[in-house]
Amino acid sequence: MLLKLSLAGMKGKLKDYFVLLSGLVMTISVFYMFQTLSWNTEFIKSNAMIRNIQLVFIVGSVLLSVVTILYMLYTNSFLLSLRQKQFGMYMMLGAKKKSIKKIMFVETMVIGCASLVIGITVGIGLAFIVGYLLAGQLNITLEGYQSFYLPAVLATFIFFIVVFLCTALINHIKLSRVQVLQLIYSDVHPDDMPIQKKKNSWLILLGLISLSLGYVSLIFMEKLREIGLFAAPTFTTLGTYLLFIGYLPVIVNRMQANKRWTSKGVTSFTFAQLNFRIQGLTKILATVAMLIALGAGAISAGLAFKNSASQMAEMMGAYDVIIKNPNAEEKALLKNIHFTEENQYRFKEDPDYTYYLRDDLENQRPLLLVSDGRKPKFKRVTEDLPEGKISLSEVKNPEVGQQLSDEWDRALWNLRTNYRVFKQMIVLDSETYHEIQGQEKLMYIGKSDKFTDYLHEWQGIDKLALEKDPILTADDLTSKYSFYNMYSSFTSGTMFMGFFLGIAFLAMMASCLMFKILSGASKDTSRYQMLRKIGVRRSALSTSIYKELFIIFLFPAMVGLAHVLIGMNMFSFIILNPYYRIWVPIIIFLIIYCLYYVITVKLYKQIVLPKE
Amino acid sequence: MGSPVVEVRNVQKVYGKKGGNQFKALNDVTFSMQEGEFVGIMGPSGSGKTTLLNVISTLDQVTSGEIKIDNVDITDMGQDELSDFRSQKLGFIFQDFNLLENMTIAENIALPLYLQGTPAKNIDAKVVTVAKRLGIEELLQKYPAEISGGQKQRSAAARALVHEPTVILGDEPTGALDSKNATSLLETMKDLNDRQNVSIMMVTHDAYSASYCQRIIFIQDGKLHKEIHRSATRELFYKEILDVLAQLGTKNA
């Protein structure tokens, strides 16, 4: 009988249960997605460029667990609030408290198990789709990646069963304490009082200190190593929570106190509403800020790794392509490329030496790469070549050798196409050069306007080089493209993890904030209705909602992005320039975030401003 | 007596779809209210008194007929126009106060002024003036949760008055108050009506509250049943009201 009652009660609030269930499913599936990588040690070890990747995942797991538990506590109190009134009524009609507690326990567990099964299924599906799409987009093959991974299923299952048991226990204790009347009137709230803000100076101070500690460990990650890896997330998270709890209400209060802003139209209500709500939102907003930091950070890191391949390639040398005796096919490919500089040098070969013509080198002095370790810089060779007539026997004598200047030595060293053949290079005056027997050949070098624009062409040229010289394999080539390609394959695994986790964290962030705002919306309905009655236009109310939620969305975004901007320092020891094109992931994130803001506003409006 | 502030002519309000199960909440109601009048609307539950107040307060639309407030026909206005109209011409006092608990009393009272775009510098003075009139000037910086029910209803009345509306509409304003607070509020309303010539229309089912009015319109089954005027003392008028209610009761039974 009680079961029947319970089911009937749930039917009446299907919409609320849907919100609840979808929130839980989202959390579980994201947790699962994270676990598929975290437990697949073989995959992450073989694909990551970070030595301590295991540690990164452990720290990530701890962070995610904390966030998940916080989120579950919210959902649980929402579940309880859905049922309280009915429970009170059952008790008034004679149901024993024991049976009520039993219903609640069973209901918590049933909802928990249902969401667990759906959540893991969705998680597997998402892991598969995201993995598949990313692999396709990034043009990589993922060896060892499994969207269905048994240890991850087990870990997720055990974690959430424990969490659900705990929340069921909490509900049990809560129900033991309350009286029947409290339950019946649970939806009649005494007017809530905006809490008078005491300046939580010590909270703010503590928050600032721990946030600074967190930032310092992010910036000096390379020196702090393992200590930094623990200190950075711990202090940054702690600082974020403390600042949101201590400082955010103060900021909002200040905004409300500014009469110039708040005395026009419905704005006074907007800020009052914001001020009223913010106390209950601080923790969830801090959570959202952390999830944004993790999500946008992971995507930025992924992109930074992707970009690092081309940057590393730029550091390889001044010229993008070097071809020995370009044939017709190669020339055709070269035609597609816009070069900023092209040089050709005549040379002759014998089994031991390569002879270059001094005049050619003199007339087309090549560029040299001079780098400060971060950004490629170029310098034209200025030093002198050996003057006058050069005696061949002298330069060929290994003990005397040809004394080329340092710059020229490097410049000529760069005129190689593979690692296989090493021949000493000798620069000759034209007279001696022409005495050399053998066919004259051409060494072509070119520098394009942008290396990454012509990847397809470079690939073709490398392929032709291999065809021309059958003894070479792909590993022997010294071309910029082959280096780029090799480096890309190193980074693609790390890049995949970054994108994968980024998407997962952003999804979790979305579900978290949306859940909190929508689950509290029904309580706001009466306020909006009252405003309607005293003559506020619907459009003005709508504007008010847009404004209020905008400010709510703004704070975590700002803090989250600040974390990302500071946090990218962490990768500076492995990537040349982690900030290269950082605006790309930030803009991608902002677009997603804005979309999601608009959706939340629409859903919220549907609840508090019913159609007339 | 001045010009009519509210004119209701042949108003019908039908719930339900055509051909379906229709219910006439208001059936050909016609009456008018002069400037400076204090009118009560009474009737048993389900008689249509709240529906009447809702259509007059522009919250609900009539099926047919015409309603003019301050010589403006409100029956063919759009939603936005109606919102503006409410915020300028009408003041509301609800049974459950409907104060916004997230704003101080001063902010609650000032809300209609904010909505009309009154310059910020004039707002404080107006709020203080109206608060003094209702004897709540000490409460201005408090939040609704910190004051009693009677004080809340006075604050709501202050909010209804602050923008000097054409007419104040009360929906069981004393319904949630104890007798002492109810009397005090009614005295205040009568005082406003007597001295400041504020027009008030109030729906109530309580004969005692109704006895403060000058004129009472009785509705039954969506139709005007009777209208009585106060001619002698309030006590006599109270008895007269009870008589009419008794009549209505026996007819029902």
Image: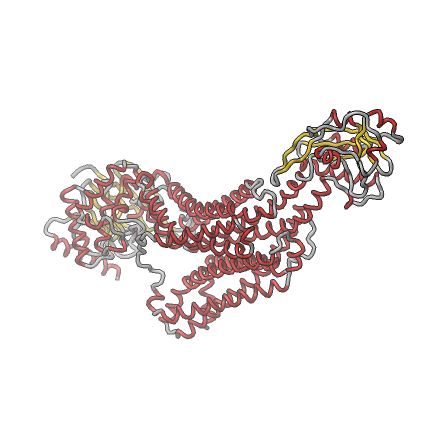
The residue at the point 59 percent across, 48 percent down is A573
Q: Is residue A52 left or right of residue B62?
A: right
The residue at the point 31 percent across, 59 percent down is A190
Look at the picture and state if A97 lies above or below B250: below
Look at the picture and state if A276 lies above or below A365: below
Figure quadrant of residue B47: bottom left
Question: Which residue is nearer to you in this view: A292 or A239?
Answer: A239
Residue A532 in view here? no
Q: Residue A205 at what x, y percent from top left?
A: 38, 52
Residue A335 in view here? yes
Q: Residue B198 at what x, y percent from top left?
A: 19, 42
Q: Is residue B1 left or right of residue A231?
A: left
Q: How many marks?
A: 0
Q: Is residue A557 left or right of residue B239?
A: right
Check the image and tell me how it is coloured. Answer: secondary structure
Instruction: Report the residue that reaches farthest toward the front.
Output: A399
Question: Which residue is nearer to you in this view: A361 or A96?
Answer: A361
